[in-house]
Image (cartoon, grey):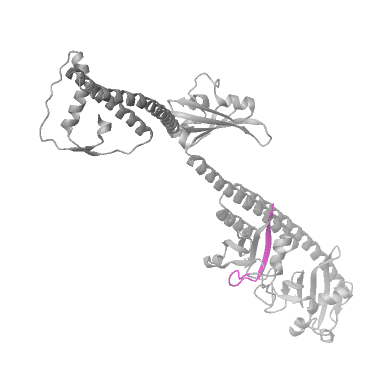
């Protein structure tokens, strides 16, 4: 006699051999289509089947037993709460071998096997649940470790592949444009697998199912006739795959695939638990991505903050510096860290008596920006300080921002511009005075010339009048020069003997010097070259 126990596998729509006796060369994990089994015939007969002669059955039920030389057979379905779990079968070479007593005995054995299978299933589910709970804790712990997305993805994938007892796995994430799923981590696969692991978004309905509906898909025989075109080659020898979407807050981030190199049916419990793990992994990956983006934004903010040439401080309500940029720290001659926590009034304004006189206090009181210009020897010059109140997300005033601009050069330029304006005013006034002076000088010059033309003029008087005439001429030139300066007249250069120029100046001042009891001694060097100059502006 011979016997066999079969387990129903709904995933393959057939029976999987669990144990066999009396069938040489036949053993687990042999498979049998449901329509080719005695169990299918037993299901039509209320779960019991007695076959006196297998040769009288229509093929193919009982074909394997016939080939093994058996004629009689009996089969009992293993059922739990109306669900078929499998079957137990016995065979004998002699036709008509099994009677009613044999069927009753087989039915009792079937009941015991059903209880055993139920208990084994419960134990397996409990074991699997414990394993998945442990894996869930591990995935959560890995996610909280704060690793970058790449290493984090690999760690998550390896843990999920291990708990699923799979042979390998791939982690795909949507690219920046959302057009492709790009492989970012591989476990149990050759190193060259990852660079080529790319799935276009429009590859087919299964990709659409992942991305739009966030639902998992299974490929029982990915390398056989049931191959799904949308699933990429995951490596030589892979037969069964499960693809589970990674669902984040803003939609699907990617998928996790687990692979088996032998045919494997993913039970609903496995799919549910792997989906739960994938959701937790998606949360971890999304968190890692947000942290990475936050770090990049912080680095960009820090770079901008320290690149501003104006000194900037951020302080709390008490006026303590929370942040300070490099420009202000360098002006103070210390590091930014040394200023953190210091009172702003002392650092920025040089005040030692607290916040009195500090615009921070005014900004807190008014809630409005405030600008002042102060002199700060400690920071090296004149500064324009703009103070802006700082509010939190709820609109509560929590501090202020100081922007300090060094306006020392600006002040110097303003002073120069002011002086230039004053000089321009003086120039205009001088031009007016010179113009008014020229008229009397012309009258005096005319009168002196008239006196000099008299024939009865005494020589001493004539010499005095000539000196007066020379001084009038000199004053006229000075007035003309002032007008020329105001009008920015060009120089009128001509070649002039220096001794002659000096003698003219001596003659102009000699009467005044003589009257003061001074004598001018002339010592002119001979052979001096002539010099190109504007004679009227020299004397």
Q: Residue at x 30, y 25 (%)?
A: 446
Above or below, comparing residue 137 to residue 328 in the picture? below
User: Can residue 535 be found in the magenta stretch?
Assistant: no
Residue at the far left in the pictured view: 526
Whether residue 53 is visible, yes or no, is yes
Q: Nearer the viewer, residue 477 or 282?
A: 477
Was residue 244 drawn as part of the magenta stretch in this picture? yes
Residue name at image x 59 percent, y 63 percent = 183
| Quadrant in the picture for the N terminus | bottom right
Stretch in magenta? 232-250
Q: Position of residue 442 (x, y in %)?
A: 33, 26
User: Residue 196 versus residue 477: which sits nearer the camera?
Assistant: 477
- Quadrant for the C terminus, please: top left
Image position, residue 441 (x, y; %): 33, 25
Quarter location, residue 21: bottom right
The tally of labels here is 0
The spot of residue 128 in percent (x, y) is: 70, 57
Q: Quadrant of residue 25?
A: bottom right
Q: Is residue 389 above or below residue 150?
A: above
Q: Position of residue 201 (x, y in %)?
A: 66, 66
Observer able to see residue 318: no
Residue 248, by quadrant, is bottom right
161 or 472, which lies in front?
472
In the displayed structure, does residue 454 sit left or right of residue 207?
A: left
């Amino acid at each position: 006699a011979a016997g066999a126990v079969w387990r129903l596998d709904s995933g393959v729509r057939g029976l999987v051999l669990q144990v066999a006796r009396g069938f040489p060369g036949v053993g687990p994990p042999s498979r049998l289509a449901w329509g080719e089994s005695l169990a299918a015939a037993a299901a039509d007969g209320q779960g019991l089947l007695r076959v006196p002669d297998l040769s009288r059955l229509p093929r193919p039920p009982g074909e394997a037993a016939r080939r093994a030389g058996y004629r009689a057979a009996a089969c009992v379905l293993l059922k739990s709460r109306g669900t078929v779990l499998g079957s137990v079968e016995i065979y004998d070479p002699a036709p008509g071998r099994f009677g009613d007593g044999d069927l009753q005995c087989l039915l009792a054995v079937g009941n015991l096997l059903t209880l055993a299978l139920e208990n084994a299933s419960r134990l397996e589910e409990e074991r699997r649940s414990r394993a998945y709970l442990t894996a869930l804790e591990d995935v959560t712990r890995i996610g909280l470790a704060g690793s970058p997305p790449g290493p984090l993805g690999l760690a998550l994938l390896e843990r999920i592949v291990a708990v699923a007892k799979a042979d390998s796995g791939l982690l795909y994430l949507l690219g920046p444009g959302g057009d492709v799923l790009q492989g970012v981590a591989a476990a149990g696969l050759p190193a060259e697998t990852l660079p080529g692991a790319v799935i276009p978004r429009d590859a087919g309905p299964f990709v659409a199912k992942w991305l739009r509906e966030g639902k998992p898909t299974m490929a029982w025989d990915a390398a056989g006739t049931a191959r799904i075109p949308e699933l990429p080659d995951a490596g030589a020898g892979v037969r069964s795959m499960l693809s589970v979407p990674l669902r984040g807050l803003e939609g699907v981030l990617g998928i996790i695939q687990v692979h088996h190199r032998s045919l494997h049916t993913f039970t609903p419990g496995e799919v549910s638990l792997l989906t739960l793990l994938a959701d937790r992994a998606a949360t971890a990956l999304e968190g890692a991505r947000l942290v990475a983006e936050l770090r990049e934004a912080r680095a960009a903010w820090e770079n901008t903050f320290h690149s501003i040439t104006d000194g900037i401080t951020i302080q709390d309500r008490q006026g303590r510096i929370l942040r300070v940029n490099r420009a202000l720290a360098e002006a103070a001659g210390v590091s930014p860290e040394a200023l953190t926590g210091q009172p702003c009034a002392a650092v920025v304004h040089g005040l030692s008596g607290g916040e009195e006189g500090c615009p921070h206090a005014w900004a807190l009181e008014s809630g409005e920006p405030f600008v002042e210009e102060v002199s700060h020897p400690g920071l090296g010059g004149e500064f324009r300080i703009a103070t802006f109140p700082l509010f939190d997300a709820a609109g509560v005033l929590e501090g202020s921002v100081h922007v300090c601009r060094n306006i020392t050069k600006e002040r110097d330029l303003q002073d120069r511009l002011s002086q230039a304006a004053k000089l321009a005013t003086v120039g205009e006034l001088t031009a007016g005075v010179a113009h008014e002076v020229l008229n009397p000088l012309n009258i005096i010059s005319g009168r002196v010339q008239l006196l000099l033309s008299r024939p009865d003029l005494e020589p001493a008087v004539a010499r005095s009048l000539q000196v007066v005439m020379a001084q009038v001429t000199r004053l006229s030139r000075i007035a003309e020069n002032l007008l020329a300066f105001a009008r920015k007249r060009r120089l009128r250069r001509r070649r002039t003997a220096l001794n002659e120029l000096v003698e003219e100046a001596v003659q102009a001042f000699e009467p005044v010097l003589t009257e003061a009891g001074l004598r001018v001694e002339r010592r002119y060097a001979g052979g001096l070259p002539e010099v190109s100059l504007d004679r009227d502006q020299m004397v």
